Amino acid sequence: MNRINRSDIVSFIESNIKGYHGKILQRLLDLKLNKILKRKNPYLFKAKSLNTAQDLVKSILEAHLSSQEEGIFGGFLEELAIFICNKVYDGRKSSAEGVDLEFEKDSIRYIVSIKSGPNWGNSGQIAKMKDHFKKAKRILRANTSRVNVVAVNGCCYGKDDSPDKGEYLKLCGQRFWELVSGDSELYTEIIEPLGYKAKERNDRFNEEYSKVINKLTIEFAQGYCDDSGAINWEKLVKFNSGKKE
């Protein structure tokens, strides 16, 4: 086990967090109204009484970006965890299907599937992860028969006070960051550098966000509002759910 300098972690975060902000901004700028409308539930819009073009556009945009942010930021945290584990335990990104990280600690080979938070998947997705773990274990044991392999579902935030799931461990939040770093307090110490230049990047994002709201509102009004200015719900539902002629 090697000790990692806090300055190395801060440097990694400050160098790479701009990539997260850049991806979110690019996803915003690449948005196409009709592409989003096809994926959203028009009945829900009506049930929520979203009766102005701007309210409806803001609602679908916020929902879309929220899901995008979770995925992109989860990818960043995965990279951070692998970076830290590499410094401490010579951990490496795994080539095994469905496994993100491999490393050895106390004569145990850990294979880790990293997720953002604890509520990441349904029963089918969890079953698929378990299958990936079984396959990776078979391959590792075929190469080194005596190796003790432990599978871990690592979650970057949250809690699960029953970590032993039988076929694997589910380590969330503090438990996960301690596993990859050997430091029980690291999970609180990475929060501050994540705010590096956040205000100026968010200010730029908000400026572009306002422009996109205005642009998509005009586009929606032209395409899905009648001459009185009311939303043409029938046209919207037909676009979203109607059969091709």
Image (cartoon, helix red, strand yellow):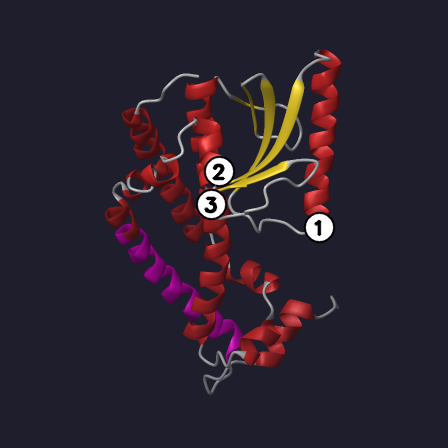
On the image, the x and y values in percent for residue 166 come to 69, 38
Q: Residue at x 49, y 61 (%)?
A: 63
Tell me the number on the disc at residue 175: 2
- Mark toward the start of the polypeptide (2 vs 1): 1
- Mark toward the start of the polypeptide (3 vs 2): 3
Residue 32 in the image: above or below residue 241: above
Q: Residue at x 66, y 41 (%)?
A: 165
- Residues rendered magenta in the picture: 203-225
Q: Residue 187 or 121: which is nearer the viewer?
A: 187
Q: Amino acid at mark 3?
A: Tyr
Q: Are marks 2 and 1 in contact (CB under 8 Å)?
A: no
On the image, the x and y values in percent for residue 203 come to 26, 53
On the image, which quarter does residue 104 sit in? top right
Q: Which residue is mark 1?
A: 123
Q: Which residue is mark 3?
A: 157
Q: Amino acid at mark 2?
A: Arg
The magenta stretch spans residue 217 = yes
Number of residues whose C-alpha sits closer than 10 Å to that of mark 1, classed few (under 14), some (14–19) or many (20 or more): few
